[in-house]
Amino acid sequence: MAQPNNGQMIDMARTTDKAALNEWYAVASLTDLDTSEDTLLLGQKITVGPGQSVTCDGAPLAVREKYGCLWTTLGTPNGEIFDIEEAAETTRRFVPCGWVKMRASGLRVVENFLDMAHFPFVHADILGSEPHTEVLHYTTEIRRDVDEVWATNCKFFQPQMTATRPEGEFAQLVYRVPAPFIVMLYRTVPDTDGMQDAIALFIQPMEEGLCRAQPVMYLTDQASTHTELLRFEQVIFLQDRIIVENQRPLLLPMEPRSEIPTRADGSSIAYRRWLKEKGLTYGTTLPETDVA
Ligand SMILES: [Fe+2]
């Protein structure tokens, strides 16, 4: 059911998409939860507060506190929230970067995060630079044992990989999609014995075409100030917001051959196939009834 809202038609119906309902979602930062606040999850109004989450009818929802966030679900998750091993390493810097609201499908935000080809154009002279525009061959797989999408052996020339690396070099990257609305990046730290920074992006799908997202980082960097780390990530993320908000359609196209794949899109193809297998349609161009 669509309702008019400031001249825009938005879908405020409660979704029946079980694949979306049965996931855990980060819906608030624990540091923001001194008092209760209203928010939207999958088109449904919920109220979150210290250690609790309830529907607008007052029904309590399951909650967890993890990775600096309050997590909740509108359905029955198959398991617990996915594991970030690096979160348990006490020597790491924990850098939650704050929520950014975007007029875009959360699934589009995941795809943008997976896409290396945009680095030289969207993050010019930071995460990429011309003429280093080629996406080298990498491997994508749906890992059946854990039900996650991974892209490994990714390499991309980055002029300024992190706050402390002003000289260009090839970044060694691994991408992981542990849930439909969560995406992670592992970035090998230069001059270490293969240590990796872990960067997660938690997405709260508010409506099909509206979400907010928060990057949460577990970093090895002991030199930069918290503000420097935060600013670096916020600059990147605000550049991405402009891109995802201008993509059309707003929702993730799932019809066969709706967007022509290139080699750079291997992770995106695997991601869409995985969503389709799950029967997840919330935030896609497919109607709910299209997938059983
Ligand atoms: Fe980006």
Image (tube, grey):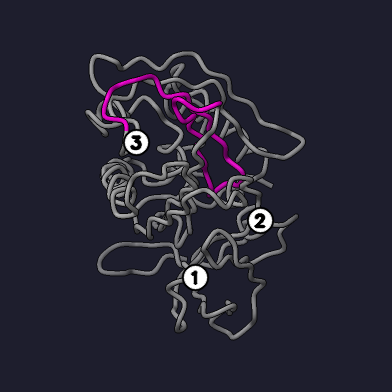
Q: Nearer the viewer, residue 48 or 68?
A: 68
The x, y position of residue 132, in whole percent, is 29, 15
> Badge 1 local density, few (<14 within 10 Å), some, or many (20+)?
some
Horizontally, is 49 left or right of 280 in the view?
A: left
Q: Nearer the viewer, residue 99 or 91?
A: 91
| Dot 3 and dot 1 residues touching (CB under 8 Å) | no
Q: Which residue was labeled with disc 2?
A: 81
Helix, strand or loop at disc 1? helix
Q: In the image, residue 258 lies at what x, y percent?
A: 45, 29
Q: Residue at x 37, y 46 (%)?
A: 250
Which of marks 2 and 1 precedes in the sequence? 1
Question: What's the residue type where badge 3 is placed?
Answer: Thr
Q: Which residue is mark 3?
A: 162
> Closer to the camera: disc 3 or disc 1?
3
Q: Is residue 239 above or below residue 58?
A: above
Is the distance from the Cβ of mark 3 to the nearest ligand 1 atom less than 8 Å?
no
Please state the extent of the stretch shown in magenta in the rendering: 165-193
Quarter of the image holding residue 279?
top right
**What's under tag 1, amino acid-wise?**
Leu
Residue plotted at (31% across, 17% down)? 133
